[in-house]
Image: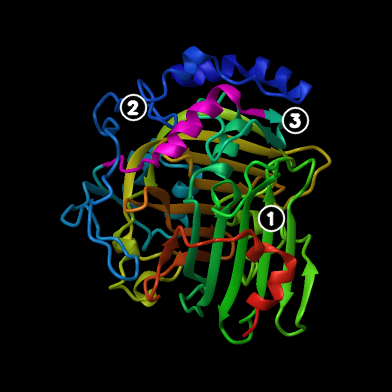
Amino acid sequence: MKTTKRLLQTGALTLSLLATGVMAAVSADEAAKLGNTLTPIGAEKAGNADGSIPAWTGGLPVNAGAVDSGGFLADPFPNEKPLFTITAQNVEQYKDKLTPGQYAMFKRYPETYRMPVYTTHRTATVPDNIIAATKQNATNAKLIQGGEGLENFQLANPFPIPKDGLEAIWNHITRYRGASVRRHVVQVTPQANGSFSPVSLEEEFAFRAMMKDADTSKPSNILFYFKQRVTAPSRLAGNVLLVHETIDQVKEPRMAWLYNAGQRRVRRAPQVSYDGPGTAADGLRTSDNLDMYNGSPDRYDWQLLGKKEIYIPYNSYRLDSPKLKYADIVKAGHLNPDLTRYELHRVWHVTATLKQGERHIYAKRDFYIDEDTWQASAIDHYDGRGTLWRVAEAHAQYYYDKQVPWYAVEVIHDLLSGRYLALGLKNEEKKAYEFDYPAKESDYTPAALRQSGVR
């Protein structure tokens, strides 16, 4: 593949630049491709050779469908039927367009796991200010401190034309998810027989550079603020997590605090990073599994292997329908495949290998990052013995009314235990996502944390 060959040819240069601690920005001529042969944030505009991936023509318009009072979106493709369905019986026919983790799911659940494949729609775009910032980033943004921080970065997508695995993963970490969003979601960790008890969460993401009360004339190392409050069940309700995510994580590592409702105390929470346990996750995800992957990339060596065409969960509007109950979706072993939707898309393939002397329960991770959004669509996780252990997928959904690409739900399957975790379900909630809520910096201080944790 031409793209893979070009990326491999740049490998020696990339390693040399990393050794100096600074990555070079792309040239003005390369950046000029954005909005021309490339989409405004760096994907190939053209479709693939056989037309199964269409050309990008601007994404869905903001009025692509109705939005109800709870913020739930109408499916813009309500009458489409699957082109075909991949099953354990025919999976070998499609293996070249599956990740190893997806292929393993058919072997783990041969009787029940299916992938209905639909017509591909390239629905995503972002607002004009994000497009403008991306173009500025292309020639100005740089990696510093061996790739553990950013310099000359604006808003989102620092490296729309990536030359290295670190650049690609920073695009995922910093990608646009709205200026601020408050979401009311459910996390489930079903038993092997499918029984589950939902944990209700209220989560807030607020990107500092887009906050209305932030003094952006003053330098700040904060990328975004994250707050997560447990609202049910009662034994966990009132616990609140606060995170200050930083841009240069060497200069200033992530800062986290936890309010414990039982003790009525706020404490620093250094465990909220890397492979520290995820909130109420029953041991099925790590802290850096949230949002598919988050946090400092410093414990891994990153390699960009080029692009692939694979089937990924996409345009998952049906899965997000408020007409569904959680019991309709959550089944033994995996989500109900009658409600999922897969499409053929191009993804960046990035491999993360644990550095010598570093510690993490995942010794290797294979990332498959959607070219149109910079979202991680699938991640395969390997243990220290090289065994494929956990398989993560993000069921992507484009919030067309707000021009925000994100997920309907993210899932991580434990192949060994036969259990999985699903986070982001909101079908039974009265309010789904609240984009552009009036986030204030004063709401994200440790002093404000105890007040937000009152039961």
Query: Which kind of residue does numbered mark 2 sit on?
Result: Lys
Segment tinted magenta in the rendering: 120-142
Q: Which disc, if any, is residue 244? A: 1
The answer to whether residue 400 is left or right of residue 269 is left
Does the magenta-highlighted stretch encompass residue 136?
A: yes
Would you identify the image quadrant in which residue 287 lies?
Answer: bottom right
* 50 is higher (above) or lower (below) than 435: above
Does the magenta-highlighted stretch encompass residue 223?
A: no
Seen at 61% across and 34% down, the residue is 153
Q: Residues within 10 Å of mark 2 (few under 14, many from 20)?
A: many
Query: Which kind of residue does numbered mark 1 sit on?
Result: His
Nearer-N-terminus badge (2/3): 2
* Nearer to the camera, 66 or 382: 66
Report x, y in % for residue 330.
41, 71
Q: Which disc, if any, is residue 146? A: 3
Seen at 67% across and 15% down, the residue is 12
